[in-house]
Image: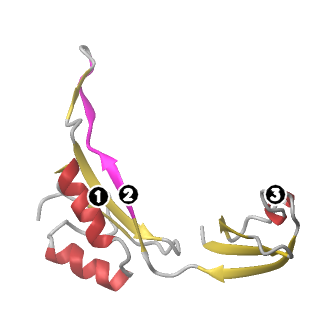
Amino acid sequence: MKKEWREYHSEEGEIWKILSEAEVKEKSQDLVSKSGKPAVLRKVMKTTDYIVTCTIPAARIIDDVKNKIGMETYFHLKISLINDDNWYGISNRHFKKEEILELVNLFTGTTKLQAERIWKSKKLGMLNTNRLERE
């Protein structure tokens, strides 16, 4: 779903922001600050093509009988767009915590075009697929 930023201002100078699904109607509580002051100004802003990062645990149950868990210290990286464009990437390799945090840092603050370049240079796999295979 498309998202939008909603920014509200009260007469007293309070400002609050809400990141919302564009199709979701405002709620009455959205129009009131935490201190109870009503909004006198509202501005709706579209989101951009900046990257959202997510770490996905690689942990899984490897033995149902013994309920044994494996890969619990590894993670995959997922990137997508805040503007909800149908574009994403899930790393085809798993990484230790320190490594995944370095990757998250690389993608933080990047646009789609920049992220695609980084993704390819790091050989993280195909984009727009849930199938994780080494290339």
Q: Are marks 1 and 2 in contact (CB under 8 Å)?
A: yes
Could you give the CA–CA distance between mark 1 and mark 2, rounded to whole angstroms?
Answer: 6 Å
Q: Which amino acid is tagged 2?
A: Cys
Residue at the location (12% across, 60% down)? Answer: 134
Could you give the CA–CA distance between mark 2 and mark 3, rounded to whole angstroms?
Answer: 33 Å
Q: Which mark is residue 35?
A: 3
Q: Nearer the viewer, residue 127 or 108?
A: 108
Q: Which one is earlier in the sequence, the residue at label 2 or at label 3?
A: 3
Q: Which mark is residue 92?
A: none
Residue at the location (76% across, 70% down)? Answer: 14
Q: Which one is earlier in the sequence, the residue at label 1 or at label 2?
A: 2
Question: In the image, which residues are magenta?
Answer: 53-64
Helix, strand or loop at mark 1:
strand
Image location (x, y in percent) of residue 88: 37, 68
Helix, strand or loop at mark 2:
strand
Report the residue marked by disc 1: 77
Please tell me in which quadrant of the rendered image residue 78 appears: bottom left
Residue at the location (30% across, 77% down)? Answer: 115
Mark 3 Cα-neighbour bin, 10 Å: few <14, some 14–19, many ≥20: few
With 42 as the anchor, is 19 left or right in this view? left
Question: Does residue 132 appear anywhere in the picture?
Answer: no
Q: Which amino acid is tagged 3?
A: Ser
Please tell me in which quadrant of the rendered image residue 111 appears: bottom left
- The quarter of the image holding the C terminus is bottom left
Between label 2 and label 3, give the one nearer the viewer. Answer: 3
Residue at the location (33% across, 85% down)? Answer: 113
Image location (x, y in percent) of residue 21: 66, 66
Magenta stretch secondary structure, dominant? strand
Between label 1 and label 3, give the one nearer the viewer. Answer: 3
Report the residue marked by disc 2: 54
Visual colour scheme: secondary structure
